[in-house]
Image: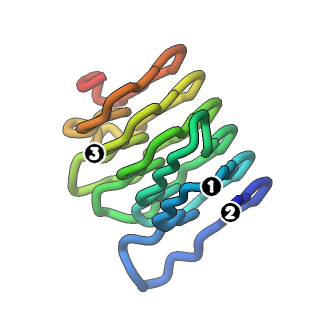
Amino acid sequence: MTHKCNNNRIYMRVIGGPTNSAGIFIPSNYTQTPDFSTYNYNQIYNARQYGIFISGSFYSNAGINQQVNNNVIGQFQGTAVTYGIYSGFSTNNEYYHNTININNVATGASRAMYINNAGNITVRNNIFAITNASSAATSIPVQFANSGSTTVSNNCYYNAASTNI
């Protein structure tokens, strides 16, 4: 099955409601058949916790099966830990040319990108910034946890607190 979420402007209206909202939520997708999903050219603003949340996208066929490219994510409204792109339990993904700005005052350590339990991941030519100095002391722009076979190159990293880069 192919999923596409391309060329959207997502402005989330934040009035009460859940504190863990996501601009784009990609649920678990386990497949044996050829698949190629794209999440490209989106603008996501005012999310509370996640800009793009990817949960359990495992593909057994060889090659890249999921692209998250050319997205702009920022103006977070929540005070909880914030993630521009969060990907957990995913394989065969590429992340190119995304611009992520974590600018809210978060109570915990935020990440512009957080990749957890993933494999065959490529992260290239992105801009990852944490621009609110009051929340940036415990935050780092990018974190890979329990991930193997990861290629990371030509990215820009910024932390207003000048720590954890």
Identify which amino acid the numbered label 1 is placed on. Thr
Instruction: Give the left or right position of residue 23, taking residue 20 as reference.
Output: right
Mark 3 element type: helix
Is residue 47 among the parts visible in the rendering? no
Q: Nearer the viewer, residue 101 or 86?
A: 86
Compared with 41, 3 (above or below) is: below
Instruction: Give the left or right position of residue 118, taking residue 32 as reference.
Output: left
Of labels 3 and 1, earlier in sequence is 1
Residue on which the image places disc 2: 1
Label 2 and label 3: CA atoms lie apart by 40 Å
Mark 1 element type: loop
Looking at the image, do the residues carrying marks 1 and 2 touch, with CB atoms under 8 Å apart?
A: yes
Looking at the image, do the residues carrying marks 3 and 1 touch, with CB atoms under 8 Å apart?
A: no
Compared with 105, 158 (above or below) is: above
Residue on which the image places disc 3: 135
Of labels 1 and 2, earlier in sequence is 2
Q: Residue at x 53, y 63 (%)?
A: 26
Identify which amino acid the numbered label 3 is placed on. Ser
Compared with 107, 113 (above or below) is: above
- Residue 33: mark: 1
- Image location of residue 139, percent across then percent down: 26, 39
Q: Residue at x 66, y 50 (%)?
A: 34
Quarter in which the N terminus is drawn: bottom right
Of labels 2 and 3, earlier in sequence is 2
- Image location of residue 39, percent across then percent down: 67, 51
Identify which amino acid the numbered label 2 is placed on. Met
Label 3 and label 1: CA atoms lie apart by 43 Å
